[in-house]
Every structure is written in structure tokens, then in C-alpha cells.
Image (cartoon, rainbow, N blue to C red):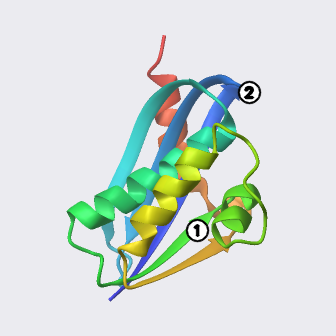
């Protein structure tokens, strides 16, 4: 089975109120899960990483580590860093990068793809839903 996971992080202000959004679909287009979580005051890059981390945690909890996973995100920074094309320099991102790499290593087959923002509307909406619930 092939699973597509769309993730997005949002920060209103940078840093500012931040949240993550993620949605996963099976190969038939059925939603496996949606995530929408407020993160507190963080940067957009922090939120992007947390979205990917929480998505892989959920996949692991659902027993999907033997599946083919494609993570799609509109954060070029996240995608290029996790693919090893760009260095991780920021001290707040280094532990998130390590956590994500560790999680991904427990999966059989994982790929990462950068997508345009307009192709990531559901994950963006989930992140913004969490932000909109904050006072």
C-alpha cells in the first residue's frame, strides 16, 4: 500500500502563535488521519518540522511502518534538509531534524517531495484551524 502524507506548519508572526496540520491518504484516496495541533509561540520552520514528526508518529502508531510513504510539504527548507541537500544550521531545528530522521529510519520506504503551497490546502487548513481556536 502507498500512503501520501501532506504536512504544513504555520506561524502568525515569526516567531508567533504556531500550529501544525497534516493529512494522510491511502492509495484509494481515503483519509487515514488528520492532525491539527497548536504549538505555542514558535517559528514557521519549527512548526513545519513538528508537522512531519507528528505525522510519522501517527503512522507508526497506526502500524504503517511497512508501507510506502510519501511526505509532501510546501516547506522547501524541510524537504531539502531531510533529503540531505541542505545543512541544518539553526540550533532549534537540529534536535527536530534528528528526531525526524530517527522516526523515518523505522519505516521501510519513505520519499519526500516539495509541492506548491496551492497543492497543500488541506494541511494548511488544519494548521490554521488550530491557530484560529486560540484566543
Q: Quadrant of the N terminus?
A: bottom left
Left or right of 86 on screen, residue 123? left
- Compared to residue 124, the image places residue 4 above or below, namely below
Residue farthest to the bottom, as pictured: 1
Q: Could you say where residue 102 lies in the image, as x and y percent from the top left? A: 44, 63
Residue under label 2, please give it: 14
Left or right of 88 on screen, residue 58? left
Disc 1: CA contacts within 10 A as few (<14), some (14-19) or many (>=20):
many
Left or right of 122 on screen, residue 75? right
Q: Quadrant of residue 2?
A: bottom left
Q: Mark 2 or mark 1: which is in front?
A: 2
Q: Which mark is residue 72?
A: 1
Q: Is residue 124 visible?
A: no
Q: Are marks 2 and 1 in contact (CB under 8 Å)?
A: no
Q: Is residue 101 visible?
A: yes
Residue shown at the point (69%, 24%) measured from the top left: 15
Tally of numbered tags: 2
- Compared to residue 135, the image places residue 101 above or below, namely below
Residue shown at the point (49%, 58%) measured from the top left: 100
The foreground one among 108 and 11 is: 108
**Helix, strand or loop at disc 2?**
loop
Amino acid at each position: 500500500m502507498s500512503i501520501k502524507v501532506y504536512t504544513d506548519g504555520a506561524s502568525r508572526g515569526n516567531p508567533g502563535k504556531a500550529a501544525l496540520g497534516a493529512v494522510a491518504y491511502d492509495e484509494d484516496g481515503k483519509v487515514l488521519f488528520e492532525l491539527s495541533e497548536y504549538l505555542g509561540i514558535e517559528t514557521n520552520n519549527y512548526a513545519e518540522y513538528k508537522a512531519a514528526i507528528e505525522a510519522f508518529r501517527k503512522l507508526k502508531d497506526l502500524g504503517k511502518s511497512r508501507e510506502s510513504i510519501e511526505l509532501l510539504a510546501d516547506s522547501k527548507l524541510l524537504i531539502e534538509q531531510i533529503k540531505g541537500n541542505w545543512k541544518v544550521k539553526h540550533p532549534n531545528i537540529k534536535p527536530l531534524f534528528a528526531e525526524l530522521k530517527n522516526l523515518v529510519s523505522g519505516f521501510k520506504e519513505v520519499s519526500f517531495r516539495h509541492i506548491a503551497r496551492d497543492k497543500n490546502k488541506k494541511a494548511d487548513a488544519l494548521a490554521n484551524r488550530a491557530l484560529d481556536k486560540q484566543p
